[in-house]
Image (tube, coloured by chain):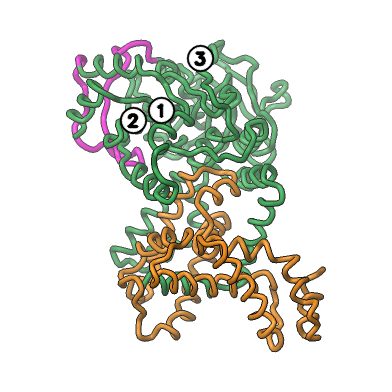
Amino acid sequence: MEDHQIVQLYWDRDEAAIPATEAKYGSYCRAIAGNILSDRRDAEECVNETWLNTWNAIPPHRPRILATFLGKITRNLSFNRYKHNRAAKRGGGQTEAVLDELAECVSGAPGAESPEHALDARELAAEIDAFLRGLPEEKRIMFLSRYWYADRVGDIAARMGTSEHRVSVILSRLRANLKGYLSERGWEV
Amino acid sequence: MTREELFEAIGEVDEALVEETRAARERAEQAPADAGAEARARRKHRRRSRAPVVAGVILAACVAAAIAIPAVRSVLHGNGSAGTVTEGAVPEEAPVVTSGEGADAGDAADNAAGGAALTEAADEAADRAADAAASGSAEQAAALYDAEAEDEALAGAPLFELNGCLYEAADDPETLMRFGLPAQITADMGGEHIAWLRQAEGSGYEPAVSQEDASAELLAYAPAPCRGVYVLHDGDRYLAAIFCNFSFTQLADTNASVELTELFRVYGVEGAEDIALVCETGRDRNEQTGEAVTDPGGIAFLYEELTVRDSYGNDDFQTAVFGGIPEEEQPAAHAAFADDMRMLRIETADGLRFYLEYYPSYGWLYGQGTLSWYWAEGRLASWLNERFG
């Protein structure tokens, strides 16, 4: 089923929207949740919550790219669950490794939020957008595979037909570049 | 800003960028082998770095060698053709290649030649960008973050293959100097005829059937005839054709390796007396750092030690160095390994230069021309550490 047809099911409040979404994007969302959360049950719960959240979000939303819309919901739900689990001293998937890498770009204490958190996230995302658009496609895909999708370095390497070492080194350089880029633009990193 | 905030902000980037990545993931998951080849094919349209290949790869486990090798060749030669020049060539024998065990699906050759060449140039570009940003030069940093500028940094010279060796052509003074050549290649440096070439589709050269079919001629480098460098006469231009590494067609499996003796022979080095000096350089292989080793005794020791080293293929090397490290610690381990690298330059009596990478904290050497690893234990490690700090 085409994405626009699935979206129309939501708008028509046709419950067939959810199984249609599950059939097409279930594996995709499970992969995202599984990357962030090591517990399979937690990941499955986040995926199920994704369908519910999507049902509640469409309408009024009419996503331009359904896959990314769903993926973002799953990512956010999964990361929230990760933070909850971390507080309860339960394990995560790749997330801790990903966060440790991103820690190279920032100086704030883990777990603490800046006072202007809600506002800065959007502005910061816009800056990161511009940074990513300046990258060659391959590097942009590597960066987002690791830090949006939380894919394992080995999986990224295999998928892109290159070596883990190369991916690791490129990601390391990209983190340094991002830190410098944000610093130059007045962000306190 | 915290790492969690950064992670969340990354989650808010433009959906079009996320979709681009999703599509790439999907293509790879639907056809893993094709995706690997597709990635390499995308790289073939990039102009190659001038730098010869750089070390240190972990095998990608899911690409069959049978697919990797042809794809590697298509990347390197830019048009999917072999581009192998054999006619009229100096009748040198192909190097002895040791085939190791474990021909797993992996593409160390492709990664090293294609990917790592990009990595080195990309690393250099990223280093300069990071340094510029840290020094507060906003304009410089902005320029260095420019995608076109980075692509330019990755730009390479045309490649071709001759008798089992891969070459790149260069005429810029910086590259020429790096390999011990004059700042400009001129007609009088061209010696005996080696082969006729023509432009390949995209970039690079391929063999020409005859002079009538040719757009370029390969000549021996008269000041130092050897396989390490030739003169490429293309139209009214004279370029140096510089040895990169042994052709991957001869590395039939991903654990193949080549003895350092073969690398020395490429540059006409048959004994220690053919070496003028050994020194350390910066990672960019430009400026010498520290004292060079010029005493005959020291050079003889190093030559003797290097030429008796067993060579290791990438599989064995990766197992030895990274095999016992948990998966989640692998990225940091690889980055630490890469950061440990020291560049050693070997300069021949004829002035030609080639390079080895030394990883002192790990005790490994890597031949940029052999794409193979060498365990530098015992006396050799002590000597290297003593001479190069």
Above or below, B49 against B266 in this view is: below
Q: Colour of chain B?
A: green
Q: Residue at x 44, y 74 (%)?
A: A84
The reply to whether callout 2 and callout 1 are in contact (CB within 8 Å) is yes
Mark 3 packing: few (<14 Cα in 10 Å), some, or many (20+)?
A: few
**Residue that badge 1 annotates:** B373
Above or below, B198 against A156 in this view is: above
Residue type, mark 2 in image: Trp
Q: Is residue B34 left or right of residue B148?
A: right
Q: Chain coloured orange: which letter?
A: A
Residues indicated by labels 2 and 1 sit on the same polypeptide chain = yes
Q: Residue at x 30, y 69 (%)?
A: A107
Q: Is residue A5 left or right of residue B111?
A: right
Residue type, mark 3 in image: Val
- Which of the two discs, 3 and 2, sits closer to the camera? 2
> Nearer the N terminus, badge 1 or badge 3?
3
Query: Which chain is mark 1 on?
Result: B
Residue type, mark 1 in image: Trp
| Range covered by the magenta-colored residues | B269-297
Query: Which chain is mark 3 on?
Result: B
The reply to whether callout 3 and callout 2 are in contact (CB within 8 Å) is no
Q: Which mark is residue B364?
A: 2
Residue B293 is one of the magenta-drawn residues: yes
Mark 1 packing: few (<14 Cα in 10 Å), some, or many (20+)?
A: many
**Residue that badge 3 annotates:** B96
